[in-house]
Image (cartoon, rainbow, N blue to C red):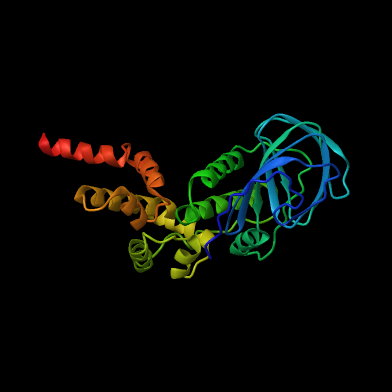
Amino acid sequence: MQGQYMMEKTGFVEVQHKNFWSPTVADLHQAEKASWEHLHTEYHRHAPPGTCQRYYQQHRVRVALQNIVVERRIDAGPLTRHRLTAGDLFISPAGSQEWLRRYEYEDFFTINLEPALLTRLAEASGRASAFELLRQKQAIQDPLLLQISHTLRAESKVAGPGFSSIYVQELSHAFAAHLLRHYGRWEEYDYSTHTSLSTSRLRRIIDYIHSNLAQPLTLTELAALVAMNPYHFTRIFKRTTGVSPHQYILSQRIEQARRLLLKGELSQTQIANQLGFYDQSHFSRTFKRVIGLTPQAYCQEHVKNIQD
């Protein structure tokens, strides 16, 4: 199922996405939210001072975007004072309760993961539901989670649901697997017996992608073509082809765009719509990032090469 995409800005917020929110002072802040399948992101800027209590139904990872001092209690544990620096992360597992006090403006980017995603990854390891995210009392520094968080924040701002869905699925799976591997209790899955896709299965996937470049493509539907779960599919597809599903789909869209541009029969807006880009601007930015030239500059360069 394709995830919904949403951006929201509010002045007063008392109920956060799928979480219980009980402020003890007026809580003036700005909020931006985006949602995909199994993953939701939020940016919040809270006004000081304030205290709040939350009960989490999702696994929640918050990234501090500035240096800040907060006091925090998880479940019935001790109250702890934290001096955070930009890039520090808090992990709060689903089912935990948090009490928080802030003393100054608070900038956080938050990633909420549906428990179903982590359960599915645990099941893929061969140990159904055999995992538990550890309650991290202290802030952590994790370069990979931080990098993925920044990528997700950028993606929530610039891309629409259809184009970014499969990319965000890959990011969410990498994010969740890293959480389980480094901050949970589970056992690694042995991939040695599932090393690659057969020629027939790979051809089935490739043909489907080429026939649906204009449509939103998700890992779930691609994995279903070969009776795999999305996490296994992503790893085995990359092992077979050398690139991730998102990278392959993007390369095919750009290659088709190059052919259509040189034919000169369609406008850039028509090409963007035909190949599943969010709009003409998104198409132009992506084309330049991959090719190194804007679509217009690419066409001019081609004409110049012919004349020479």
**Figure check: 102 above or below 215:** above
**Figure check: 85 above or below 94:** above
264 vs 96, left or right, is left
**Figure check: 82 above or below 209:** above
2 vs 140, left or right, is left
Q: Nearer the viewer, residue 302 or 248?
A: 302
Residue pictured at 39% horizontal, 44% vertical: 281
Give the x, y percent position of residue 120. 61, 63
Give the x, y percent position of residue 146. 60, 39
Residue pictured at 36% horizontal, 43% vertical: 284
Instruction: Farthest residue to the front: give it.
Output: 11
Residue pictured at 81% horizontal, 42% vertical: 26
Give the x, y percent position of residue 129. 69, 64
The image quarter in which residue 109 lies: top right
The total of numbered circles placed on residues is 0
Q: Nearer the viewer, residue 305 or 231?
A: 305
**Figure check: 79 above or below 250:** above
Asked if residue 72 shows in the view, the reply is no
Image quarter where the C terminus lies is top left
Q: Nearer the viewer, residue 57 or 24?
A: 24
The image quarter in which residue 198 lies: bottom left
Q: Nearer the viewer, residue 48 or 90?
A: 48
Asked if residue 205 shows in the view, the reply is yes
Give the x, y percent position of residue 212. 37, 63
